[in-house]
Amino acid sequence: MTARESLVRLCVLYPDLLGTYGDGGNATVLAQRLAWRGIGVDLVSVESGESVPDSCDLYLVGGGEDGPQTQAARGLAASGALHRAVDAGAVVFAVCAGMQILGERFPDRHGIDQPGLGLLDCITMRVDRPRAVGELLTYDATVTGSGGEVTSLGTLTGFENHGGRTVPGPSATALGRVEIGEGNGDGSEGVVNGRVLGTYLHGPALARNPLLADALLRWVLQVDTLSELDDTDVEALRQTRIAAARQHELAPRRTWRDRLRGS
Ligand code: GLN
């Protein structure tokens, strides 16, 4: 591996607004996978109201509730730092509300469309269906490397909890296809434009899916391969969760309102 000389700078954006679902763990996973490989890491967390740096290599945006996600979108639009960073080649990993605000528009807590950051070609809307809550499994997940090579990520596993559904636009690629759960809501899961990647997978997603974590790191380090890590324990845990999801052991309990609606 030919890692870059400098530190990898990771930035967790607005964990005070977008920290509801444990997605902060994604930064811990990336930092540890870099450290295990002897690559230096600088991990910063930027709360709402603080100045956003535009010089980081990878930005993480987590999930959150409808009100705080509108606030986060406004803060990031006003700052402009994330746009400057993406223009300069930064990688962005965004989960659920994070993905929704990176798109062209998303609904606020009153269901009114709000402008997104336009870094992902997708729109998010309310639909007349219950929230998507439960385990989420995908197949055919791939990412494209800097040289155009396509890498399979195998089965992606996580959980989802969202009211909005997302429609990828013509310039976007879906991250994968849904086996169990809802994902974007049209059979696809996640949205990718260049090195900006959004997903509905919580978990944290990168703890449950080390291949996805390493795909992001390859983008950041601009390498085709990374040294192997021993992921035996993670793989055992993954297989347990995948099997449980397929047997619907983890299916969410429906509310009485859902039952009466026949959903
Ligand atoms: N508030 C958004 C929705 O419900 C996103 C939720 C989340 O980040 N899990 O659609």
Image: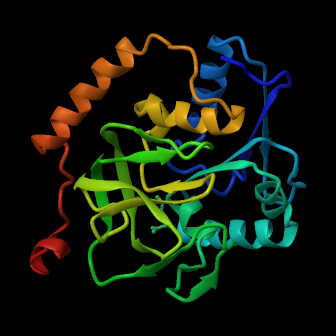
Image coordinates of residue 106 in percent, x first then y, are 55, 78
Left or right, 85 with reference to 15? right
Which residue is pictured at 27% across the width and 65% down the height? 187
Residue nearest the viewer, comparing 84 with 165:
84
The image quarter containing residue 128 is: bottom left
Residue nearest the viewer, comparing 14 with 231:
231
Residue placed furthest toward the bottom: 112
Image coordinates of residue 246 in percent, x first then y, are 14, 42
Left or right, 117 with reference to 229? right
Residue nearest the viewer, comparing 228 with 9:
228
Report the coloring of the rendering.
Answer: rainbow
Left or right, 177 with reference to 57? left
The image quarter containing residue 154 is: top left
Question: In this picture, is 106 found above or below 97?
Answer: below
The image quarter containing residue 245 is: top left
Which residue is pictured at 54% across the width and 68% down the height? 100
Which residue is pictured at 27% across the width and 78% down the height? 129
Image coordinates of residue 94 in percent, x first then y, are 58, 53
Image coordinates of residue 13 in percent, x first then y, are 72, 51
Can you say which quadrant of the picture contains the C terminus?
A: bottom left
Which residue is pictured at 59% across the width and 59% down the height? 98
Question: In this picture, is 57 found above or below 229?
Answer: below
**Image mark count:** 0
Question: In this picture, is 82 found above or below 24?
Answer: below
Can you say which quadrant of the picture contains the N terminus?
A: top right
Q: Is residue 249 visible?
A: no
Residue nearest the viewer, comparing 13 with 179:
179
Q: Is residue 153 visible?
A: yes
Left or right, 110 with reference to 15? left
